[in-house]
Image (cartoon, grey):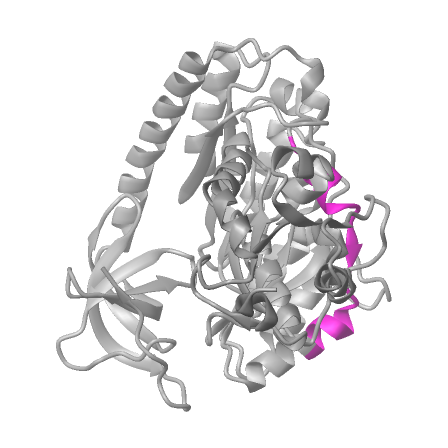
Amino acid sequence: MSSAREEKTFYLETFGCQMNVHDSEKVIGTLLQQGYRQVESVEEAGLVLYNTCSIRDKAEQKVFHRLADFRSLQSKGKRFGVLGCVAQQEGTRIFERAPHVSLVCGSASYRNLPSLLAELEAGNPRVTGLDDRETDQAFETEFTVRNNPHRGYITIIEGCDKFCAYCVVPYTRGKERSRASRSVIREAARMAERGFTDIQLLGQNVNSYRDPEGVMSFAGLLAAVGRLPGVRRVRFTTSHPRDFTRDIVEAMDSVPAICNHVHLPVQSGSSRVLKRMLREYSREEYLERIAWMKAARREISITTDVIVGFPGETDEDFEQTISLLESAGYDGVFSFKYSPRPNTPALQFPDSISDALKAQRLTILQERQRQLQISQNRRYLGEMVEVMVEGYNSSRGQWIGRSAQNKVVNFVSPALVPVVGGYYDVRIRATFPNSLAGELERTCWTPERSPVTLPVLQ
């Protein structure tokens, strides 16, 4: 046995969304508790883990390319594990595609990691943890490692019951299962006591949250976390339009700590396409929710996801999506070309739209949204924006932060050196499609504890 394995070292690389990032924090904490030491490179590690995403084919293939790149290192005594969505989706087929892999564990089985690691250490060449989607178990652990000392994640609901026609998540993440509100609030309170000021509540469909004890609604939970001493910002992602209710907007209006930003994926502006996608709402119902946010007392920033080229999408359907950009007034759009995913209902439809046409539609959509963002961001010129500092760009001589509306703000500070994790008022002097720029005017709040090492961004 190699010395690296005797030392129980591990390297973990994460692909995909914020849910995966936070899952990795919990996995790392579990490994450390089991006596492993985290290292910074594959070459140093005895156990190499990839926490994977399968939402798009490109992300999935990237994982297998990475595994192939390091296959030769198996001869040096290293073991490899695939975690997350690709692990659950592919199961034991991963051993066929990548024979040097020793561990395959889906996200719904992370609570079993200690026993799976024990099997691996005992010499079992192939270990699996693959719960079916009917599991009621969630992954809660007191050993979570927090990679950011100021902003932290809390998963309040796992899994998905929506079964959108294009999406693999219900099959890889299991059914929806929510944590008790009391458990969530306790964790948030502990984080606030440790100095975390920005807390983000996570879920595949975060607003589908259903308190198993029946104590709080999602909006009530948002408000309760936002009222905790020490919490300055509460974010939540990702929301599903079907379960987006008016009381969420009311909570945002009544509790200042709840950030005035909502990510509400629409996927298409055509009711016909939405029906084929099994999204469970129409264009009109979606715009009703946008109207609730536009009528709020606070100005709410709205971002979304859009898929172009879904099977059967006509030119007219696509034009309805373009017109929706203007009707909704999005502050940002994450847009993608449709790609077929395993086991999804959309496979019944022929993927008849050429990749060239998908690419053309994607370019048109992105350029239209870019022009809209240029216009919309101009309204911030001369305004004061509160920014939480995240780092420093040495090449530009600018500090980098984010507003409550989730806008990137770059700024200069001639008079003082800001503290990472601190909150400052910045006067906006210039606007761009994807960011704002300005100058620091005054300090709002800074951490009482010693500043952390400054992240320098090149």
Residue 295 seen in this snapshot = no
Q: How far across and how far down the image is residue 354, in percent? A: 47, 10
Residue 436 seen in this snapshot = yes
* Residue depicted at x 22% and y 72%: 440
* Residue depicted at x 22% and y 65%: 411
On the image, which quarter does residue 156 sit in?
bottom right
* Residue depicted at x 82% and y 68%: 215
Q: Is residue 242 above or below residue 233?
A: above
Q: How far across and how far down the image is residue 318, in percent? A: 48, 18
Q: Nearer the viewer, residue 346 or 118?
A: 118
Q: Is residue 279 above or below residue 260?
A: above
Q: Which residues are magenta?
A: 167-186
Q: Nearer the viewer, residue 65 or 329?
A: 65
What is the number of callouts on the image?
0
Q: How far across and how far down the image is residue 225, in percent? A: 63, 73
* Residue depicted at x 29% and y 81%: 443
Q: Is residue 225 above or below residue 402?
A: below
